[in-house]
Amino acid sequence: MITSKMIAHGILRAIGVLLLLVLGVYFIYQIQTVIVYLLISLVLALIANPIVEFLKRKLKFKNTLAVAFTLTLFIMLLIGLASLFVPLIIDQGNKLSLLNANAIETRSLELYRQLDVYLNSHNMDMDRILKETDLTSKIKFNSITDFLNSLINTISSIGIGIVSVFFITFFFLKDKVQFILIAKRILPDSHEDQILNSVDKIRELLSRYFIGLIIQLSVVCVLYLVVLLIFGVDNAFIIAFLCALLNIIPYVGPLIGTAVAGILTMLSFINSDFSAVTLPTTLYVLIGFTLVQFIDNNITSPIIFSKSVNSHPLEIFLVVLIAGMLFGIPGMIIAVPVFTILKVIAKEFFPDTTWIQLFTKNI
């Protein structure tokens, strides 16, 4: 017989479970940055592990020395990539130092005047268009300081993130044996083969994924470079490399890269006639970059990534979108590798589940 006491106890238990669930989700949300660091470190450790094993097996390095040497190589590679942009930053900084807010406003007003004349010649009222869109209230010419402060904060956050990721990765590699032993203690002995199969499959798929990513970035970089060289943009290789590197951020990265290319192109021709040279050249570059993105989005990326991780393009898109909503840009970067890891684990440990069979049939 069900009594009121049992019902009250059941309600309280349900409320308690719901409260714990809400607190758990809130806690995960609060530490999402740490979770992203851990996931990036895990992926980096999987990439670095073959190098560590090579150093230990062929060159007889001790484990800690092999890990330290491998991560040092990664850091040197990162510094080398960053140093490529120093000439670009210096060059664009010199050009920006010749400008000021008043000069920008003067040039913008002149552009406005020319545009107004053009629209009037086609029986369109510029003032009425601006009033309807309320565009003038959104244009500010004194926001350079705010932008620089935001840029400094972003650089600081990136610096902290890089240090954190390398620190965590060091211990993932150095103490991987202990982590494996802990995993074996947590999981029954009957799952040992599944664990080993998962690790091997994950390593294979991630290797294919990163090789595919390098191929994609190389193709995009070459196409960007061709566009920039055609229109005589300064520092064409560095700009093309930077914009291609931004493609690591799925979907959002190419848009950021196009905006960066547009800004740097305008700066390259800042001393030329604005309406006759600077603006048309910038528009041509933007059109060229848009065509490159069209080729990449519809030909290069679907072919490379679908075959490298054996996932449908729509599946990848939804995973990246959800990861971006939950963890921002870092989540978008690691979404595909982490999703691939989860798919492999799910297939090994739950092979008879119908919906898992559906998602992992190509693995």
Image (cartoon, helix red, strand yellow):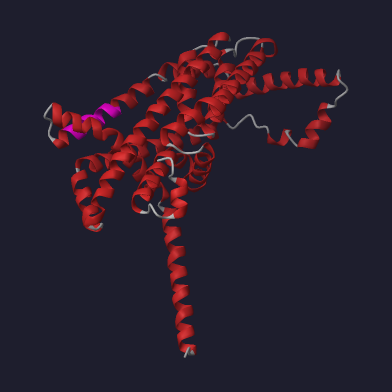
In magenta segment, residue 291: no
Outermost residue toward the right in this view? 123
Q: Residue at x 34, y 45 (%)?
A: 38
In the depicted view, which residue is nearer to us: 20 or 85? 20
Location of residue 350 in the rendering, given as x and y in whole percent from the top left corner? 37, 54
Do we see residue 100 in this rendering? no
- Which quadrant holds residue 172? top left
Give coordinates of residue 76: x percent, y percent. Answer: 29, 25
Q: Viewer-proximal residue, 245 or 145?
A: 245
Side of 257 where 62 appears, left or right: left
Q: Is residue 330 above or below residue 30?
A: above
Residue depicted at 60% across the width and 23% down the height = 290
Q: Is residue 267 visible?
A: yes
Query: Which quadrant of the figure has residue 274?
Result: top right
Expressed as whole percent of the image width and height from the top left, the position of residue 240 reads 49, 18
- Image height of 259 relative to 189, above or below: above
The majority secondary structure of the magenta stretch comes to helix
Q: Is residue 117 above or below residue 201?
A: above
Q: Nearer the viewer, residue 361 or 7?
A: 361
Q: Residue at x 21, y 44 (%)?
A: 176
- In the figure, residue 360 lies in which quadrant? top left
55 relative position to 231: left or right: left
Query: Which region of the structure is painted magenta?
Result: 66-75
Residue 295: where, in percent of width, then height? 56, 23
| Quarter of the figure that contains the C terminus | top left
